[in-house]
Image (cartoon, helix red, strand yellow):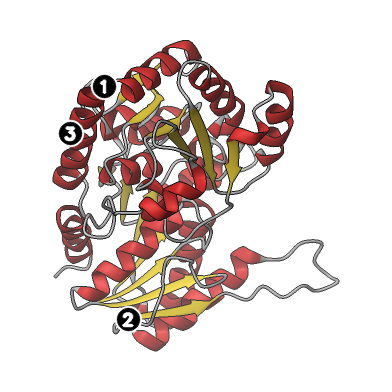
């Protein structure tokens, strides 16, 4: 089957999942065409059956801002016509599903058989942030209603879509996934020594895009409570507007020397492999891809009981969940894990088992294949 995948190239969860899906589909014999503004950072080396098509959005004096929606739709038309796409899979309702709908209208106007079917996957901010904005809500709802199949990455997101936008059409839940052969704990003792001076010091890790919803201030507050009770250091992976909060709070709390920020990293398994605990006190997570990656690498997770996170991990079994404002509770759970080796091992192993049993590529990718086959009438 010929499949077009539209996604952002950024390091966020949607771009990671879309790229990994493309790679997995190509490995299963499909012809996959990834359409984005730049090469997604997870695409890696050349793979047979997987190709990339860049969207270029030129600037003209006539336009006050770049016309990404139009240039994307135009690129989708070109790719669909040239490679006879059966399905376009748009990750995000707006602008990607919207652009795909426009492209399909253009294709249908010349030859109805050229118009591919459209699958739209909702990842979160297209509903909880953009979808809530009156400036976009109507077009978000329209793009969802007009897609042939709509999927959401969690039951929580499906419910939010119906509540926030009044959408009544069927929405299929297909969760995010990862390759458990790649995401596993590695022997990285030499790397760990770069972050921890001795074996008694514990390493807490946080991985995100450092947006306000990730509550970096809460990360710093919880870590400060942890380090007062357990020798610990904090490793921050990623970049974003809230990184300045790290530097400011580091000075205010007197913990600057205990915090290391390494920026965005393409390969996170080596960094998870040196960590003892993953901290994710987000205000909301539609799924929690970073938490799943940590679990697969046998890193216990302490996170907010919000959004789709309770669907990813079981509280007290494969991690610990607390109300977003309960920073003391998060710190208490973290300290328990870091001071009780038996508890740490039990939670770490349960987390790995859950990640591989419920969210592995071998389990989830066939669900998308079945979705494509159904919508394409095959």
Q: Does label 2 or label 1 sit earlier along the sequence?
A: 2
Front in this rendered view, residue 250 or 364: 250
Q: Are marks 3 and 1 in contact (CB under 8 Å)?
A: no
Residue 135 position in % (x across, y down)? 65, 41
Residue 337 position in % (x across, y down)? 32, 23
Q: Residue furthest bottom?
A: 82
Q: Kindly identify which residue carries mark 1.
A: 315
Which SS class for mark 1?
Answer: loop
> What is the distance, in whole Å, between disc 3 and disc 1 at their CAs?
11 Å
Residue drawn at 36 percent across, 74 percent down: 115
Residue 350 is marked as 3
Front in this rendered view, residue 251 or 178: 251
Using a 10 Å C-alpha cutoff, classify the residue at mark 3 as few (fewer than 14 neighbours), some (14 to 19) or many (20 or more).
Answer: many
> What is the distance, in whole Å, between disc 3 and disc 2 at their CAs?
33 Å
Q: Which of the image's four quarters has the C terminus?
A: bottom left
Residue drawn at 42 percent across, 46 percent down: 123
Residue drawn at 18 percent across, 36 percent down: 349
Vertical relation: 8 (above or below) 235: below
Q: Residue furthest right?
A: 61
Q: Kindly identify which residue carries mark 2.
A: 47
Q: Can residue 163 be seen here?
A: yes
């Amino acid at each position: 089957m010929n499949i077009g995948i539209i996604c952002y190239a950024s390091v966020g969860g949607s771009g990671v999942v879309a790229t990994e899906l493309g790679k997995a589909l190509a490995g299963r014999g499909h012809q996959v065409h990834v359409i984005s503004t730049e090469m997604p950072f997870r695409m890696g080396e050349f793979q047979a059956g997987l190709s990339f098509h860049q969207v270029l959005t030129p600037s003209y004096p006539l336009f006050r801002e770049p016309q990404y929606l139009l240039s994307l739709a135009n690129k989708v038309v070109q790719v669909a016509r040239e490679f006879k796409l059966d399905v376009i899979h748009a990750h995000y309702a707006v602008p990607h599903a919207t652009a795909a709908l426009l492209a399909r209208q253009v294709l249908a106007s010349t030859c109805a058989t050229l118009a591919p079917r459209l699958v739209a996957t909702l990842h979160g901010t297209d509903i909880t942030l953009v979808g809530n904005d009156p400036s976009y809500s109507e077009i978000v709802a329209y793009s969802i209603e007009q897609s042939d199949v709509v999927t959401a990455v969690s039951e929580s997101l499906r419910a939010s879509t119906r509540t926030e936008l009044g959408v009544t059409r069927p929405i299929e839940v297909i969760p995010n996934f990862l390759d458990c052969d790649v995401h596993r704990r590695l022997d990285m003792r030499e790397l760990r020594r770069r972050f921890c001076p001795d074996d008694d010091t514990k390493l807490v890790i946080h991985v995100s895009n450092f947006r306000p919803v990730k509550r970096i201030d809460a990360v710093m507050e919880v870590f400060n409570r942890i380090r007062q009770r357990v020798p610990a250091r904090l490793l921050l992976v990623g970049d974003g507007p809230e990184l300045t909060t790290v530097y400011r709070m580091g000075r205010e709390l007197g913990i600057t020397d205990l915090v290391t920020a390494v920026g965005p990293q393409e390969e996170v398994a080596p960094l998870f492999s040196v960590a003892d605990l993953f901290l994710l006190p987000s205000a909301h997570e539609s799924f929690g891809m970073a938490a799943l990656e940590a679990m697969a690498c046998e890193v216990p997770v302490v996170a907010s009981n919000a959004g789709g996170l309770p669907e990813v991990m079981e509280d007290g079994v494969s991690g610990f969940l607390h109300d977003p404002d309960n920073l003391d509770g998060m710190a208490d759970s973290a300290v328990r894990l870091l001071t009780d080796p038996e508890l740490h091992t039990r939670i770490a192993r349960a987390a790995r088992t859950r990640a591989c049993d419920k969210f592995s590529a071998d389990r989830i990718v066939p669900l998308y294949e079945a979705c494509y086959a159904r919508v394409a009438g095959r």
